[in-house]
Amino acid sequence: MDAHFKPEHYHRPVDMKTASALLAQRGARVIAGGTDLLVNGPASTESLVDINGLGLSYIREDDGLRIGSTTSFSYLLRSPLLERYPYRVIADAAGELGHHNLRHVATVGGNICNAVPSADAPVALIALDAAVIIHGPSGERTVPLDGFFKFVRETILGEGEFLKEIAVPVQPESGACFQKLGRTKVDIALVNAACRLSIIDGLISDSRIVLGAVYPTPLRVRAAEDMLNGKEFTVELVAKTAIIASDATKPISDHRASAEYRREISSVLVKRAIIKAYGRAEGSP
Amino acid sequence: MRVAVNFKINGRDRTAHVEPRTSLLDVIREDLGLIGTKEGCGKGECGACTVIMDGDAVPSCLILAAGVEGKEIITIEGIGENGRLHPLQEAFVRYHASQCGFCSPGMILTAKAFLNRNPNPSEAEVRDVMMSNLCRCTGYEKIVEAIMAVANGEVA
Protein backbone atom coordinates (compact mmCIF):
# COMPACT_ATOMS: atom_id res chain seq x y z
CA MET A 1 0.00 0.00 0.00
CA ASP A 2 1.20 3.47 -0.85
CA ALA A 3 1.18 5.41 2.41
CA HIS A 4 0.57 8.65 0.51
CA PHE A 5 -2.56 7.46 -1.23
CA LYS A 6 -5.19 9.02 1.03
CA PRO A 7 -8.31 10.14 -0.77
CA GLU A 8 -10.51 12.38 1.37
CA HIS A 9 -13.79 11.64 -0.34
CA TYR A 10 -15.66 8.68 -1.75
CA HIS A 11 -18.56 8.89 -4.17
CA ARG A 12 -20.68 6.19 -5.71
CA PRO A 13 -22.77 7.83 -8.40
CA VAL A 14 -25.65 5.89 -9.94
CA ASP A 15 -25.83 7.82 -13.19
CA MET A 16 -23.12 8.66 -15.70
CA LYS A 17 -23.76 12.39 -15.80
CA THR A 18 -23.08 12.68 -12.08
CA ALA A 19 -20.03 10.46 -12.46
CA SER A 20 -18.55 12.78 -15.08
CA ALA A 21 -19.33 15.86 -12.98
CA LEU A 22 -17.58 14.31 -9.97
CA LEU A 23 -14.62 13.24 -12.10
CA ALA A 24 -14.18 16.77 -13.42
CA GLN A 25 -13.24 17.91 -9.92
CA ARG A 26 -9.59 18.34 -8.97
CA GLY A 27 -7.87 15.19 -7.74
CA ALA A 28 -10.80 12.93 -8.64
CA ARG A 29 -10.02 9.39 -9.76
CA VAL A 30 -12.11 6.50 -10.98
CA ILE A 31 -12.13 3.34 -8.94
CA ALA A 32 -13.52 0.16 -10.49
CA GLY A 33 -11.95 -3.09 -9.27
CA GLY A 34 -9.27 -1.22 -7.33
CA THR A 35 -6.62 -3.91 -7.77
CA ASP A 36 -4.14 -1.43 -9.23
CA LEU A 37 -5.29 1.71 -7.45
CA LEU A 38 -5.09 0.21 -3.96
CA VAL A 39 -1.53 -0.93 -4.64
CA ASN A 40 -0.21 2.06 -6.60
CA GLY A 41 -2.69 4.85 -5.92
CA PRO A 42 -1.20 8.27 -6.63
CA ALA A 43 -0.80 10.75 -3.79
CA SER A 44 -2.63 13.39 -5.84
CA THR A 45 -5.92 11.49 -5.43
CA GLU A 46 -8.37 13.62 -3.43
CA SER A 47 -11.56 11.78 -4.16
CA LEU A 48 -12.57 8.37 -5.44
CA VAL A 49 -15.45 8.01 -7.86
CA ASP A 50 -16.65 4.42 -7.65
CA ILE A 51 -18.22 3.57 -11.01
CA ASN A 52 -19.49 0.14 -9.95
CA GLY A 53 -22.96 1.59 -9.41
CA LEU A 54 -23.42 2.58 -13.05
CA GLY A 55 -24.59 -0.80 -14.31
CA LEU A 56 -21.53 -1.32 -16.48
CA SER A 57 -20.83 -4.96 -15.62
CA TYR A 58 -22.00 -6.96 -18.61
CA ILE A 59 -21.04 -8.65 -21.84
CA ARG A 60 -23.65 -8.90 -24.56
CA GLU A 61 -24.03 -9.40 -28.27
CA ASP A 62 -24.95 -6.24 -30.14
CA ASP A 63 -23.45 -5.69 -33.57
CA GLY A 64 -20.43 -7.63 -32.32
CA LEU A 65 -19.78 -7.60 -28.59
CA ARG A 66 -20.37 -4.92 -25.99
CA ILE A 67 -18.44 -5.20 -22.75
CA GLY A 68 -19.13 -2.84 -19.84
CA SER A 69 -16.00 -1.30 -18.38
CA THR A 70 -16.55 -2.59 -14.82
CA THR A 71 -16.95 -6.20 -15.96
CA SER A 72 -14.60 -8.47 -14.04
CA PHE A 73 -12.35 -10.92 -15.81
CA SER A 74 -14.01 -13.92 -14.18
CA TYR A 75 -17.39 -12.67 -15.36
CA LEU A 76 -15.95 -12.56 -18.89
CA LEU A 77 -14.55 -16.06 -18.51
CA ARG A 78 -17.98 -17.41 -17.62
CA SER A 79 -19.52 -15.98 -20.78
CA PRO A 80 -20.37 -18.47 -23.52
CA LEU A 81 -20.05 -15.57 -26.01
CA LEU A 82 -16.28 -15.82 -25.71
CA GLU A 83 -16.24 -19.47 -26.75
CA ARG A 84 -16.82 -18.39 -30.33
CA TYR A 85 -13.88 -17.66 -32.60
CA PRO A 86 -12.22 -15.27 -32.77
CA TYR A 87 -13.69 -13.73 -29.59
CA ARG A 88 -11.92 -16.56 -27.83
CA VAL A 89 -8.77 -14.39 -27.83
CA ILE A 90 -10.43 -12.23 -25.14
CA ALA A 91 -10.89 -15.30 -22.95
CA ASP A 92 -7.27 -16.29 -23.61
CA ALA A 93 -6.10 -12.96 -22.21
CA ALA A 94 -8.63 -12.86 -19.36
CA GLY A 95 -7.55 -16.32 -18.22
CA GLU A 96 -3.88 -15.31 -18.11
CA LEU A 97 -4.38 -12.17 -16.06
CA GLY A 98 -3.17 -12.30 -12.46
CA HIS A 99 -4.52 -15.20 -10.43
CA HIS A 100 -7.95 -16.77 -10.11
CA ASN A 101 -9.13 -14.64 -7.18
CA LEU A 102 -7.74 -11.41 -8.59
CA ARG A 103 -9.81 -12.00 -11.72
CA HIS A 104 -12.97 -11.81 -9.58
CA VAL A 105 -12.07 -8.21 -8.74
CA ALA A 106 -9.98 -6.77 -11.58
CA THR A 107 -12.03 -5.18 -14.36
CA VAL A 108 -11.48 -5.00 -18.08
CA GLY A 109 -11.88 -1.20 -17.99
CA GLY A 110 -9.27 -0.89 -15.27
CA ASN A 111 -6.84 -3.05 -17.20
CA ILE A 112 -7.25 -0.67 -20.13
CA CYS A 113 -7.35 2.69 -18.33
CA ASN A 114 -4.32 2.09 -16.12
CA ALA A 115 -2.42 2.06 -19.40
CA VAL A 116 0.35 -0.13 -18.07
CA PRO A 117 2.37 -1.48 -21.02
CA SER A 118 2.16 -5.08 -19.77
CA ALA A 119 -1.66 -5.12 -19.62
CA ASP A 120 -3.17 -8.20 -21.24
CA ALA A 121 -6.69 -7.16 -22.27
CA PRO A 122 -5.75 -4.26 -24.59
CA VAL A 123 -3.48 -6.47 -26.70
CA ALA A 124 -6.22 -9.05 -27.30
CA LEU A 125 -8.88 -6.39 -27.90
CA ILE A 126 -6.79 -4.38 -30.37
CA ALA A 127 -6.32 -7.58 -32.37
CA LEU A 128 -10.13 -7.57 -32.76
CA ASP A 129 -10.26 -3.88 -33.80
CA ALA A 130 -12.09 -2.97 -30.57
CA ALA A 131 -13.22 0.57 -29.92
CA VAL A 132 -13.87 2.25 -26.57
CA ILE A 133 -16.87 4.35 -25.72
CA ILE A 134 -15.90 7.21 -23.47
CA HIS A 135 -18.41 9.11 -21.36
CA GLY A 136 -17.65 12.71 -20.52
CA PRO A 137 -19.29 15.96 -19.43
CA SER A 138 -20.38 16.72 -22.98
CA GLY A 139 -21.63 13.26 -23.86
CA GLU A 140 -20.05 10.22 -25.46
CA ARG A 141 -17.33 9.66 -27.98
CA THR A 142 -16.05 6.49 -29.58
CA VAL A 143 -12.39 5.98 -30.41
CA PRO A 144 -10.43 2.97 -31.61
CA LEU A 145 -8.70 1.27 -28.68
CA ASP A 146 -5.50 1.38 -30.72
CA GLY A 147 -5.62 5.18 -30.44
CA PHE A 148 -6.53 5.30 -26.74
CA PHE A 149 -3.03 5.08 -25.27
CA LYS A 150 -0.60 8.00 -25.29
CA PHE A 151 2.25 6.71 -23.18
CA VAL A 152 2.98 4.62 -20.08
CA ARG A 153 0.02 5.32 -17.75
CA GLU A 154 -1.25 8.02 -20.09
CA THR A 155 -4.44 7.86 -22.12
CA ILE A 156 -6.54 10.27 -24.13
CA LEU A 157 -9.13 10.46 -21.32
CA GLY A 158 -9.84 14.10 -20.58
CA GLU A 159 -11.34 15.91 -17.62
CA GLY A 160 -14.50 14.26 -16.39
CA GLU A 161 -14.19 11.39 -18.84
CA PHE A 162 -14.29 7.69 -18.05
CA LEU A 163 -14.40 4.48 -20.04
CA LYS A 164 -17.96 3.26 -20.32
CA GLU A 165 -17.86 0.36 -22.72
CA ILE A 166 -15.72 -1.64 -25.10
CA ALA A 167 -17.22 -2.36 -28.50
CA VAL A 168 -15.84 -5.31 -30.43
CA PRO A 169 -17.04 -5.25 -34.04
CA VAL A 170 -18.50 -8.26 -35.82
CA GLN A 171 -15.52 -10.35 -36.80
CA PRO A 172 -14.67 -11.80 -40.18
CA GLU A 173 -14.38 -15.56 -40.26
CA SER A 174 -11.01 -15.82 -38.58
CA GLY A 175 -8.87 -17.35 -35.88
CA ALA A 176 -7.19 -15.44 -33.09
CA CYS A 177 -4.84 -16.23 -30.26
CA PHE A 178 -3.23 -14.50 -27.29
CA GLN A 179 0.15 -15.52 -25.90
CA LYS A 180 1.85 -14.39 -22.72
CA LEU A 181 5.11 -15.08 -21.00
CA GLY A 182 5.50 -14.07 -17.36
CA ARG A 183 8.18 -14.86 -14.81
CA THR A 184 5.58 -17.00 -13.08
CA LYS A 185 2.08 -17.88 -14.18
CA VAL A 186 0.55 -15.20 -11.96
CA ASP A 187 3.06 -12.43 -12.69
CA ILE A 188 2.52 -9.62 -15.19
CA ALA A 189 3.66 -10.17 -18.76
CA LEU A 190 7.31 -9.92 -19.70
CA VAL A 191 5.87 -9.88 -23.19
CA ASN A 192 2.42 -10.63 -24.55
CA ALA A 193 1.15 -10.89 -28.08
CA ALA A 194 -2.02 -11.46 -30.04
CA CYS A 195 -2.76 -12.38 -33.62
CA ARG A 196 -5.95 -12.56 -35.63
CA LEU A 197 -6.11 -13.71 -39.22
CA SER A 198 -8.46 -15.04 -41.85
CA ILE A 199 -7.78 -17.61 -44.52
CA ILE A 200 -9.27 -16.87 -47.93
CA ASP A 201 -8.62 -19.26 -50.79
CA GLY A 202 -5.68 -20.68 -48.91
CA LEU A 203 -4.08 -17.28 -48.36
CA ILE A 204 -3.74 -15.32 -45.12
CA SER A 205 -5.80 -12.16 -45.14
CA ASP A 206 -6.79 -9.28 -42.86
CA SER A 207 -4.26 -10.14 -40.16
CA ARG A 208 -3.57 -8.27 -36.94
CA ILE A 209 -0.39 -8.53 -34.91
CA VAL A 210 -0.22 -6.78 -31.56
CA LEU A 211 2.43 -6.86 -28.83
CA GLY A 212 2.41 -5.72 -25.22
CA ALA A 213 5.09 -4.87 -22.62
CA VAL A 214 7.64 -4.04 -25.30
CA TYR A 215 6.70 -0.44 -26.04
CA PRO A 216 5.21 2.43 -24.00
CA THR A 217 1.78 1.48 -25.36
CA PRO A 218 0.31 -1.67 -26.92
CA LEU A 219 2.04 -2.04 -30.26
CA ARG A 220 0.24 -3.02 -33.45
CA VAL A 221 2.82 -3.90 -36.09
CA ARG A 222 1.34 -3.18 -39.50
CA ALA A 223 4.57 -4.06 -41.33
CA ALA A 224 4.30 -7.57 -39.90
CA GLU A 225 0.65 -7.80 -40.92
CA ASP A 226 1.59 -6.72 -44.46
CA MET A 227 4.16 -9.48 -44.56
CA LEU A 228 1.48 -12.08 -43.77
CA ASN A 229 -1.41 -10.80 -45.86
CA GLY A 230 -1.97 -12.40 -49.24
CA LYS A 231 0.49 -15.20 -48.63
CA GLU A 232 0.34 -18.89 -48.06
CA PHE A 233 1.10 -20.05 -44.53
CA THR A 234 4.65 -21.41 -44.29
CA VAL A 235 7.09 -21.80 -41.44
CA GLU A 236 9.47 -19.41 -43.22
CA LEU A 237 6.79 -16.75 -43.59
CA VAL A 238 5.91 -16.98 -39.90
CA ALA A 239 9.58 -16.69 -38.92
CA LYS A 240 10.10 -13.65 -41.17
CA THR A 241 6.97 -11.98 -39.84
CA ALA A 242 8.03 -12.59 -36.25
CA ILE A 243 11.37 -10.88 -36.88
CA ILE A 244 9.64 -7.84 -38.38
CA ALA A 245 7.40 -7.69 -35.32
CA SER A 246 10.23 -7.97 -32.82
CA ASP A 247 12.26 -5.36 -34.73
CA ALA A 248 9.43 -2.89 -34.14
CA THR A 249 9.60 -3.26 -30.36
CA LYS A 250 11.36 -0.85 -28.01
CA PRO A 251 11.45 -2.82 -24.79
CA ILE A 252 12.96 -1.69 -21.50
CA SER A 253 15.29 -3.58 -19.20
CA ASP A 254 14.07 -3.97 -15.63
CA HIS A 255 14.23 -6.42 -12.74
CA ARG A 256 12.00 -8.84 -14.63
CA ALA A 257 13.93 -9.09 -17.90
CA SER A 258 16.43 -7.37 -20.15
CA ALA A 259 15.39 -5.51 -23.28
CA GLU A 260 17.32 -8.04 -25.31
CA TYR A 261 15.39 -10.94 -23.78
CA ARG A 262 12.06 -9.20 -24.29
CA ARG A 263 12.86 -8.61 -27.97
CA GLU A 264 13.84 -12.24 -28.43
CA ILE A 265 10.69 -13.44 -26.70
CA SER A 266 8.57 -11.05 -28.79
CA SER A 267 9.44 -12.96 -31.90
CA VAL A 268 8.80 -16.30 -30.20
CA LEU A 269 5.35 -15.25 -28.96
CA VAL A 270 4.37 -13.71 -32.28
CA LYS A 271 5.34 -16.97 -33.98
CA ARG A 272 3.23 -18.98 -31.55
CA ALA A 273 0.32 -16.58 -31.85
CA ILE A 274 0.31 -16.75 -35.65
CA ILE A 275 0.58 -20.53 -35.72
CA LYS A 276 -2.22 -20.98 -33.22
CA ALA A 277 -4.42 -18.30 -34.82
CA TYR A 278 -3.95 -20.03 -38.17
CA GLY A 279 -4.86 -23.36 -36.65
CA ARG A 280 -7.96 -21.88 -35.08
CA ALA A 281 -8.94 -20.24 -38.36
CA GLU A 282 -8.82 -23.76 -39.79
CA GLY A 283 -11.03 -25.00 -37.00
CA SER A 284 -8.75 -26.46 -34.36
CA PRO A 285 -9.50 -25.63 -30.70
CA MET B 1 -15.07 12.00 5.40
CA ARG B 2 -16.51 8.76 6.70
CA VAL B 3 -18.81 6.58 4.67
CA ALA B 4 -21.52 4.43 6.25
CA VAL B 5 -21.66 1.03 4.62
CA ASN B 6 -24.08 -1.84 5.28
CA PHE B 7 -23.23 -5.41 4.49
CA LYS B 8 -23.75 -8.95 5.72
CA ILE B 9 -20.85 -10.86 7.22
CA ASN B 10 -21.12 -14.49 8.28
CA GLY B 11 -24.88 -14.14 8.12
CA ARG B 12 -25.11 -11.03 10.31
CA ASP B 13 -26.04 -7.54 9.15
CA ARG B 14 -23.37 -5.01 10.02
CA THR B 15 -22.76 -1.32 9.48
CA ALA B 16 -19.30 0.18 9.38
CA HIS B 17 -18.21 3.81 9.16
CA VAL B 18 -15.09 3.86 7.07
CA GLU B 19 -12.56 6.26 5.58
CA PRO B 20 -12.45 6.26 1.76
CA ARG B 21 -9.14 4.38 1.72
CA THR B 22 -10.03 1.73 4.31
CA SER B 23 -9.82 -1.81 2.97
CA LEU B 24 -12.36 -4.50 3.66
CA LEU B 25 -9.53 -6.38 5.36
CA ASP B 26 -9.05 -3.59 7.90
CA VAL B 27 -12.76 -3.46 8.67
CA ILE B 28 -12.87 -7.22 9.17
CA ARG B 29 -9.85 -7.33 11.46
CA GLU B 30 -9.91 -3.96 13.24
CA ASP B 31 -13.59 -3.04 13.45
CA LEU B 32 -15.17 -6.47 13.63
CA GLY B 33 -12.33 -8.28 15.39
CA LEU B 34 -12.47 -11.24 13.00
CA ILE B 35 -8.75 -11.86 13.03
CA GLY B 36 -8.88 -15.24 11.28
CA THR B 37 -8.47 -13.19 8.10
CA LYS B 38 -4.76 -12.40 7.81
CA GLU B 39 -2.80 -9.59 6.25
CA GLY B 40 0.18 -10.83 4.27
CA CYS B 41 1.49 -8.74 1.40
CA GLY B 42 -1.26 -6.12 1.26
CA LYS B 43 -1.01 -6.17 -2.53
CA GLY B 44 -3.34 -8.98 -3.54
CA GLU B 45 -0.51 -11.38 -4.28
CA CYS B 46 -0.38 -13.76 -1.32
CA GLY B 47 -4.02 -14.61 -0.64
CA ALA B 48 -3.76 -14.56 3.18
CA CYS B 49 -6.59 -12.01 3.33
CA THR B 50 -8.98 -14.02 1.14
CA VAL B 51 -12.66 -13.84 2.01
CA ILE B 52 -15.73 -14.92 0.07
CA MET B 53 -17.82 -12.05 -1.28
CA ASP B 54 -21.07 -12.78 -3.11
CA GLY B 55 -19.83 -16.30 -3.78
CA ASP B 56 -16.36 -15.47 -5.09
CA ALA B 57 -13.08 -15.67 -3.18
CA VAL B 58 -11.41 -12.25 -3.26
CA PRO B 59 -8.34 -10.60 -1.74
CA SER B 60 -9.93 -8.36 0.92
CA CYS B 61 -6.85 -6.11 1.09
CA LEU B 62 -7.73 -4.84 -2.40
CA ILE B 63 -11.42 -4.33 -1.75
CA LEU B 64 -12.46 -0.85 -0.76
CA ALA B 65 -14.66 -1.13 2.33
CA ALA B 66 -16.73 1.86 1.20
CA GLY B 67 -17.80 -0.16 -1.84
CA VAL B 68 -19.19 -3.28 -0.12
CA GLU B 69 -22.69 -1.90 0.40
CA GLY B 70 -25.17 -4.77 0.18
CA LYS B 71 -22.51 -7.45 -0.23
CA GLU B 72 -22.50 -10.82 1.53
CA ILE B 73 -19.15 -11.70 3.01
CA ILE B 74 -17.96 -14.94 4.55
CA THR B 75 -14.77 -15.21 6.58
CA ILE B 76 -13.10 -18.28 8.02
CA GLU B 77 -15.09 -17.75 11.24
CA GLY B 78 -18.31 -18.24 9.27
CA ILE B 79 -17.90 -21.59 7.57
CA GLY B 80 -18.22 -24.15 10.37
CA GLU B 81 -21.72 -25.20 11.31
CA ASN B 82 -23.15 -26.02 14.73
CA GLY B 83 -19.74 -25.99 16.34
CA ARG B 84 -18.36 -28.44 13.78
CA LEU B 85 -15.48 -27.71 11.46
CA HIS B 86 -16.23 -27.30 7.77
CA PRO B 87 -15.14 -30.37 5.76
CA LEU B 88 -12.26 -28.39 4.26
CA GLN B 89 -11.05 -27.46 7.74
CA GLU B 90 -11.42 -31.07 8.79
CA ALA B 91 -9.42 -32.18 5.75
CA PHE B 92 -6.67 -29.62 6.43
CA VAL B 93 -6.31 -31.14 9.90
CA ARG B 94 -6.41 -34.72 8.68
CA TYR B 95 -3.94 -34.20 5.82
CA HIS B 96 -1.57 -31.95 7.81
CA ALA B 97 -2.15 -29.14 5.31
CA SER B 98 -1.36 -26.45 7.88
CA GLN B 99 2.02 -25.79 9.42
CA CYS B 100 2.30 -22.22 10.65
CA GLY B 101 -1.34 -21.77 9.66
CA PHE B 102 -1.08 -18.19 8.44
CA CYS B 103 -2.20 -19.03 4.90
CA SER B 104 -4.81 -21.62 5.91
CA PRO B 105 -7.90 -19.40 6.25
CA GLY B 106 -7.30 -17.93 2.80
CA MET B 107 -6.52 -21.32 1.29
CA ILE B 108 -9.69 -22.82 2.73
CA LEU B 109 -11.91 -19.97 1.54
CA THR B 110 -10.43 -20.01 -1.98
CA ALA B 111 -11.06 -23.76 -2.10
CA LYS B 112 -14.57 -23.43 -0.67
CA ALA B 113 -15.71 -20.82 -3.20
CA PHE B 114 -14.17 -22.83 -6.00
CA LEU B 115 -15.72 -26.15 -4.97
CA ASN B 116 -19.12 -24.49 -4.64
CA ARG B 117 -18.94 -23.57 -8.33
CA ASN B 118 -17.01 -26.66 -9.47
CA PRO B 119 -17.92 -29.65 -7.30
CA ASN B 120 -15.90 -32.14 -9.36
CA PRO B 121 -12.62 -30.48 -10.30
CA SER B 122 -9.51 -32.15 -11.62
CA GLU B 123 -6.34 -31.85 -9.58
CA ALA B 124 -4.92 -29.60 -12.30
CA GLU B 125 -7.85 -27.22 -11.91
CA VAL B 126 -7.40 -27.13 -8.15
CA ARG B 127 -3.69 -26.36 -8.55
CA ASP B 128 -4.50 -23.57 -10.99
CA VAL B 129 -7.03 -21.95 -8.66
CA MET B 130 -4.77 -22.34 -5.62
CA MET B 131 -2.17 -20.14 -7.32
CA SER B 132 -4.22 -17.36 -5.73
CA ASN B 133 -2.69 -18.28 -2.36
CA LEU B 134 0.89 -18.59 -1.23
CA CYS B 135 2.08 -21.02 1.44
CA ARG B 136 5.67 -20.79 2.66
CA CYS B 137 5.67 -23.98 4.74
CA THR B 138 4.02 -27.01 3.23
CA GLY B 139 4.97 -27.00 -0.44
CA TYR B 140 1.29 -27.30 -1.43
CA GLU B 141 1.12 -31.09 -1.80
CA LYS B 142 -0.80 -31.60 1.44
CA ILE B 143 -3.06 -28.66 0.68
CA VAL B 144 -4.00 -30.06 -2.72
CA GLU B 145 -4.49 -33.53 -1.17
CA ALA B 146 -6.83 -32.07 1.44
CA ILE B 147 -8.89 -30.19 -1.13
CA MET B 148 -9.10 -33.18 -3.45
CA ALA B 149 -10.20 -35.35 -0.53
CA VAL B 150 -13.16 -33.02 0.02
CA ALA B 151 -13.89 -32.82 -3.72
CA ASN B 152 -13.90 -36.62 -3.87
CA GLY B 153 -16.22 -36.89 -0.88
CA GLU B 154 -13.63 -38.58 1.33
CA VAL B 155 -14.02 -35.95 4.03
CA ALA B 156 -17.51 -34.66 4.74
Image (cartoon, coloured by chain):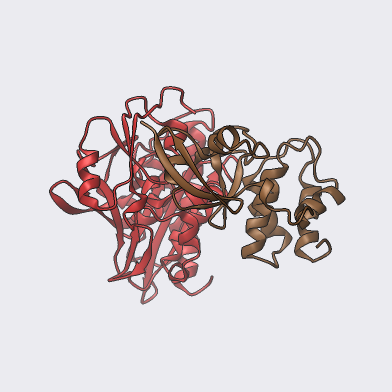
Chain colours: A red, B brown
Q: Tell which residue pokes out farthest to the top in this image.
A: A4
Left or right of residue B116, residue A77 in this image: left
Q: Tell which residue pokes out farthest to the left in this image.
A: A138
| Quadrant the C terminus of chain A occupies | bottom right
Q: Position of residue A21 (x, y in %)?
A: 19, 42
Q: Nearer the viewer, residue A165 or A5?
A: A5
Q: Tell which residue pokes out farthest to the bottom in this image.
A: A201
Q: Position of residue A226 (x, y in %)?
A: 31, 57
Q: Nearer the viewer, residue A144 or A274?
A: A144
Snapshot quadrant of residue A132: bottom left
Snapshot quadrant of residue A152: top left
Q: Nearer the viewer, residue A84 or A32?
A: A32
Count the labels in the image. 0
Q: Residue at x 61, y 51 (%)?
A: B10
Q: Position of residue B37 (x, y in %)?
A: 64, 39
Camera sees residue A60: yes
Q: Nearer the viewer, residue B99 or A124?
A: B99
Q: Is residue A186 placed above or below A92 in the rendered structure? A: above
Q: Position of residue A54 (x, y in %)?
A: 31, 54
Q: Is residue A168 placed above or below B67 in the rendered structure? A: below
Camera sees residue A208: no
Q: Residue at x 37, y 51 (%)?
A: A52
